[in-house]
Image (cartoon, rainbow, N blue to C red):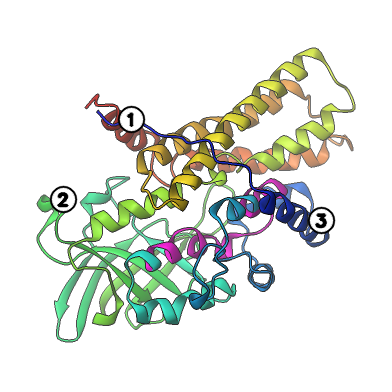
Amino acid sequence: MTYFTFPNAPPLPEAEKLRGEVRAFLAEELRNVPAHVRAASWSGFDAQFSRRMGERGWIGMTWPKQYGGHERSSLERYVVLEEMLAAGAPVAAHWIADRQSGPLLLRFGTEEQRQSVLPKIAAGELFCCIGMSEPDSGSDLAAVRTRAEPVDGGFRVNGTKLWTTYGHRAHYMLLFCRTSGGPADRHKGTSQLLVDLTLPGITIRPIADLSGAKHFNEVVFENVFVPGSALIGEEGNGWHQVTSELAYERSGPERFLSSFVLFAELIRVLQRNPSDHATIAVGRLISHFVVLRQLSRGVAWLLQNGENPALEAAVVKDLGALVEQEMPDVVRSLVEIEPGSEQTRELARTLYYIVQAAPSFSLRGGTREILRGIIARGLGLR
């Protein structure tokens, strides 16, 4: 049986000093941005904002300096992330590259890939997207059908990727594909490629979500030649690499702070008319946030120590999605939002956005069913 480990991450004075710097920066950057806009946060794309973060050394914080990083701790990086999300900063441009693409290249990439890509990511100038999900396969990543056939000098890629966040504005995709065998092989014969999205034969089509936003995309590869230098790690080792990448994707504070701007707006409204019922409901939510933060910081500590906390990350992601998706119902149970009311207008607009976004919270990064299967396996139940 596998046991879960959530260590108690130690306090770090440098991180708390950094927190003050980040808050001052955000107070200036977001001073005129209303809550309903800030609620988008990690779907909010602002390339100039990402460059300003890069100038301050807040992207690629834990990476070696030789690749444009700053060699700071995972807990310092965690502070920047949670402050950005709690305030509702537009982090989508650099988000994926900083969170998982960069760390993956540091671990498995070639020296050429690291030197050419990582410094630009850290500067907030180069953006990445994830090429994992496909049509008809749901969250069954091992059912990947996009094929990269080895040819002279590289690979010939054909297939389709789906739900590719900001693929239309990214410079590179980290493509998970099959380089040998067939779907029956499941985990064998898969690889990862660092694909320049300007290559001929790539078509990117937008997909509108429930709110009408078009940050999702369908990316189609038709006989796309990708040079052999794009191979990440070892050919055929894609499954091991991509599952280690998911630990970065599933464990961060974004897994329970996606609706935090709505929570903050709720508190602002409730302060005008407090009640025992509201105090109990808010206290319950705060207790969830405290526990989730403790678990998530524990995963950050494991990552800093070179471990692969894939199981722990699945727990954080699943529990966090439950709290995030509960938030709109809590708001509606505590506040009667009246049309035209000045006091609740911004709360209503923020609630409107989160209600539309909330169904995706238990889909992105792995569906609830997939995550609970991983957790059950970790507990020896399947």
What residue does disc 3 label? 27
Q: Please tell me whether residue 157 is drawn above or below residue 357 in the rendered image.
A: below
Q: Please give the name of the residue rendered at 24% of the width and 24% of the height, measured from the top-left corner.
A: 381
From the image, tell me which residue sits under label 2: 186
Residue 227, percent from left and from top: 26, 83
For mark 1, what is the residue? 3
Question: Hey, what amino acid is under mark 2?
Answer: Arg
| Quadrant in which the N terminus is drawn | top left
What SS does tag 2 mark? loop
Above or below — where is 85 with respect to 284?
A: below
| Amino acid type for the residue under numbered disc 1 | Tyr
Measured from the top left, where is residue 221 in percent x and y? 30, 72
Element at badge 1? loop
Q: Earlier in the sequence, mark 1 or mark 2?
A: 1
Q: Position of residue 82 (x, y in %)?
A: 64, 48
Q: Quadrant of residue 147?
A: bottom left
Q: Residue at x 16, y 50 (%)?
A: 186
Of all residues shown, which one is farthest toward the top?
Answer: 276
Q: Residues within 10 Å of mark 2 (few under 14, many from 20)?
A: some
Quarter in which the C terminus is drawn: top left
SS state under label 3 = helix
Choose the circle earlier in sequence order: 3 or 1: 1
- In this rendering, the label closer to the viewer, 1 or 2: 1
